[in-house]
Amino acid sequence: VESVNVGMGGKGAGLASTVHFISGLLTEGYVKGKPFVYGGRLNYATNNHCAQKGLSGDFECYMQPFSGCTVAKKASFAKWRAPYARNNRCAIGRLCNDLSQFKMLPKGPFGSKGLFWFRSAMVMHVMRLNAEVDAMMALDELKRAIGFKQPIIGVHVRHGDACH
């Protein structure tokens, strides 16, 4: 199992950056037919709520597992250590220079739909809320209340603290 750490010192990154790298690595695993286990950290899960559930730093505090490799994931997560990094630009190992997995497409019907569709499907898979969070947010009720109709494309505009 390959170990990849995302963010400054490998200690995690923003939600979008983390999801971006995870979806790219899931794509690589799918295309190459190899398992992917994320043993890194989600900064937004390092809080008392997640710690009380035994999920401090774990995506699964909020999301459904995106891999069925539970034993390998637990082992990878348990032995995780923040790697040395000189700066916050690149603590993601081989991904500093090799970003090829972000352009990978599988052969067959999924790949023929295009890169945007495939990566969106991977992100949708990664971002499936677990039952507790889904019930707490009640998104289906909210969508009905505000008149949400499909298709809709959401755009996130960041006005914030980007450092590069």
Image (cartoon, rainbow, N blue to C red):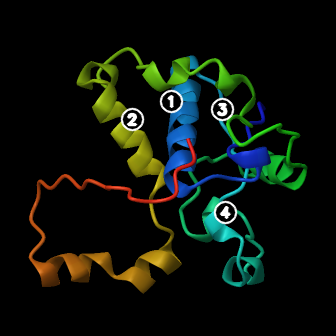
The spot of residue 15 in percent (x, y) is 53, 56
Q: Residue at x 52, y 57 (%)?
A: 161
Q: What element carries label 1?
A: helix
* Label placed on residue 131: none
Q: Name the residue under label 4.
A: 43
50 above or below 153?
below
Contact between labelled residues 1 and 2, with CB atoms less than 8 Å apart? yes
Q: How far apart are marks 4 and 3 (CA)?
A: 24 Å
118 with respect to 52 (left or right): left
- Dot 2 or dot 3, earlier in sequence: 3
Q: In front: 72, or 150?
A: 150
Please give the residue where the numbered disc 1 appears in the rendered image: 27
Amino acid residing under circle 3: Pro
Q: In which quarter of the image is residue 84?
A: top right
Q: Crowding at label 4, few (<14), some or many (≥20) Cα neighbours within 10 Å?
A: some
Q: Which of marks 4 and 3 is nearer the N terminus?
A: 3
Residue name at image x 69 percent, y 45 percent: 38
Distance between the Cα atoms at labels 2 and 4? 22 Å
Where the N terminus falls, by quadrant? Answer: top right
* CB atoms of marks 4 and 3 within 8 Å: no
Q: Name the residue under label 3.
A: 35
Looking at the rendered image, the disc whose residue lies closer to the viewer, 2 or 3, is 2
- Whether residue 39 is visible, yes or no, is no
Q: Position of residue 110 (x, y in %)?
A: 32, 26
- Tag 1: residue type? Thr
Toward which corner of the image does residue 145 lie, by quadrant?
A: bottom left
Location of mark 2 (residue): 119
Does residue 63 show up? yes
